[in-house]
Image (spheres, rainbow, N blue to C red):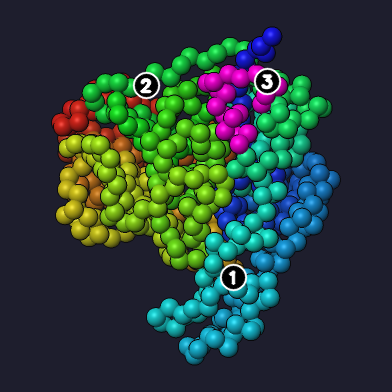
């Protein structure tokens, strides 16, 4: 007798974890993982163990949102201690690696004075030997680069740190992901499987394609004591099938934050996937994973921040994706890990690196990588691209969080791509300071005033209008604001009408309207149908 087919419930979270911390891209690359273990995870856990009530008070303070504070209400200290002790034991070699990076940096600063660096190789900490090259820039400032491929093939890339947590959600309430580790909960099932495990694809596909429960239990090696909880994640009710777009226009769908789906009858392109997967009632209308095609031709990644590379979205999409386009970087800089390597090592084997002003063409579509400036705190980060996507004579420009620090750059770009029909522009123009994201990678503490001057900030009105005045769009949309409730646990952003990014984006929308440009700050969801060869849109 055939076993009944079951389907994964639409509100089941497949949450990727690294040593029980929310897994983002800097926890994949071995070097940045090492620095985040010592500079973020252990610091936060030690601080919580010493003063849990301070953390509890900070979490309740809206002004401290996104700070390094664990959200456990001052309790569960023994569990945090146990996680801290397990981390110290399990990650001893990565902790040693992190300390060696700091030691190497001190060596270079004290001894790299413009003379040959060759004699310093014998002084490189033993754990780093063969993994680093010592270099100068043209002004004789010493530094090093990492052989990142070799690190992935070494003891320092240990997939046993990776796991997934399964649980049912009915709302968007979650602690800030970079500050709170996930402790055991009775309703959460932890599966100690790496991110490249075939079971993640099998499980994810069950949102649309049913299979026997016993089959997926076997694939994921679910233990007997966990089978009752595991069974609760499934239903025998088949979902509505996805209705592929078959019209003769270009359909744009906004999924929230910086996630845009572009479809024609022949192709689907998904930009910066961050999707509210979960089928529960919400006060904010939004598309979810039921609105994602069964096949995605191209995913475009703009840059290596946790709100643009979201493994919680990407891993469940992996079985649908034909190609992923990422910005190229090969420099081996600690602050600029290779995105393709990270994706390859977690099971994505279809990754294409793209350079600035390089074009990929297929059918009637061209995708061109456009330089991305700013928003990275003046760090030398190469892995960032905006994208120009063109269908016949109709084009979109996805600027992401780029900050127009020098408009002349875009005047040069204009000579190549010309006018665009639609611009999507990030305007989170305050931005967190350098240390908020990159602090764990720094070997010396930055003075507060310097830290505050170097921010993860997008365009304000003046800079955004400079871009609009160059490319002459017929429509301009502000996005990537981190405002939707399902993004808050990643972005830590909460706005009021008086918030500077809201004021600036309102001003830009008004200025666009005065020029006859359709403009809006996107929120929740939006769908527009565009004619391929005319700036005519049918809005819904």
Label 3, on which residue?
Answer: 213
Q: Nearer the viewer, mark 3 or mark 2?
A: 3
Label 1, on which residue?
Answer: 131
Disc 2 crowd rating (10 Å Cα; few below 14, some 14-19, many 20+) is: some
User: Which numbered disc flags the more N-terminal residue, 3 or 2?
Assistant: 3
Part of the protein shown in magenta: 198-216
Q: Position of residue 2 (x, y in %)?
A: 66, 11
User: Which numbered disc flags the more N-terminal residue, 2 or 1?
Assistant: 1
Spatial separation of the CA atoms under disc 3 and disc 2: 28 Å
Examine the rendering and report whether any part of residue 135 can be seen.
Answer: yes
Q: Position of residue 283 (x, y in %)?
A: 50, 21
Label 2, on which residue?
Answer: 244
Overall secondary structure of the magenta section: helix
Between 166 and 346, the one nearer to me in the picture = 346
When asked about the image quadrant of residue 213, the answer is top right
Residue at 67% over, 57% down: 37
Residue at 64% over, 56% down: 157
Find out whether residue 500 is within the magenta segment: no
């Amino acid at each position: 007798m055939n076993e009944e087919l079951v389907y994964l419930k639409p509100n089941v979270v497949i949450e990727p974890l690294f040593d029980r911390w929310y897994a983002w891209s800097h926890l994949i690359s071995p070097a940045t993982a090492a620095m985040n273990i010592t500079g973020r995870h252990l610091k936060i856990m030690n601080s919580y163990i010493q003063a849990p009530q301070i953390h509890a008070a900070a979490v309740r303070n809206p002004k401290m949102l996104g700070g390094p504070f664990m959200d456990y209400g001052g309790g569960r200290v023994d569990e945090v201690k146990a996680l801290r002790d397990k981390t110290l034991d399990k990650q001893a070699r990565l902790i040693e690696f992190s300390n060696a990076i700091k030691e190497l940096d001190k060596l270079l600063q004290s001894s790299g004075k413009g003379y040959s660096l060759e004699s310093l190789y014998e002084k490189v900490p033993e754990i780093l030997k063969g993994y680093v090259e010592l270099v100068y820039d043209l002004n004789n400032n010493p530094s090093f680069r990492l052989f990142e491929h070799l690190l992935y093939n070494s003891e320092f890339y240990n997939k046993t740190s990776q796991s997934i947590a399964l649980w049912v959600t009915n709302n968007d309430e979650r602690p800030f992901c970079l500050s709170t580790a996930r402790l055991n909960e009775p309703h959460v099932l932890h599966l100690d499987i790496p991110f490249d495990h075939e079971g993640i694809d099998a499980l994810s596909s069950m949102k649309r394609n049913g299979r026997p429960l016993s089959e997926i239990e076997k694939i994921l090696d679910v233990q007997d004591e966990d089978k009752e909880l595991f069974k609760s994640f499934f239903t025998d009710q088949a979902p509505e099938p996805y209705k592929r777009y078959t019209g003769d226009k270009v359909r744009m769908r906004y999924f929230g934050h910086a996630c845009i789906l572009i479809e024609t009858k022949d192709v689907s392109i998904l930009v910066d996937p961050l999707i509210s997967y979960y089928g529960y009632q919400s006060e904010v209308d939004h598309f979810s994973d039921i609105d994602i095609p069964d096949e995605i031709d191209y995913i475009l990644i703009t840059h290596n921040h946790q709100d643009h590379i979201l493994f919680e979205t990407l891993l469940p999409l992996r079985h649908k994706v034909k190609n992923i386009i990422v910005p190229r970087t090969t420099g081996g800089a600690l602050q600029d890990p290779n995105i393709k390597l990270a994706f390859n090592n977690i099971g994505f084997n279809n990754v294409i690196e793209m350079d600035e002003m390089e074009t990929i063409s297929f059918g009637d579509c061209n995708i061109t990588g456009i330089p991305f400036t700013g928003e990275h705190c003046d760090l030398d980060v190469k892995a960032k691209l905006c994208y120009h996507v063109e269908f016949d004579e109709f084009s979109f420009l996805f600027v992401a969080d780029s900050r127009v620090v020098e408009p002349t750059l875009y005047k040069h770009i204009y000579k190549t791509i010309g006018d665009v029909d639609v611009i999507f522009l990030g305007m989170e123009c305050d931005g967190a300071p350098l240390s908020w994201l990159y602090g764990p990678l720094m070997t010396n503490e930055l003075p507060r005033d310097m830290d505050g001057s170097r921010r993860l900030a997008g365009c304000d009105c003046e800079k955004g209008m400079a871009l609009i005045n160059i490319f002459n769009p017929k429509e301009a949309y502000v996005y990537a604001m981190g405002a939707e409730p399902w993004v808050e646990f990643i972005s830590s952003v909460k706005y009021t009408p008086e918030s500077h990014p809201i004021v600036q984006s309102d001003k830009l929308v008004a200025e666009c309207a005065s020029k006859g440009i359709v403009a809006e700050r996107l929120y929740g969801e939006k769908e527009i149908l565009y004619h391929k060869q005319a700036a005519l849109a049918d809005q819904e």
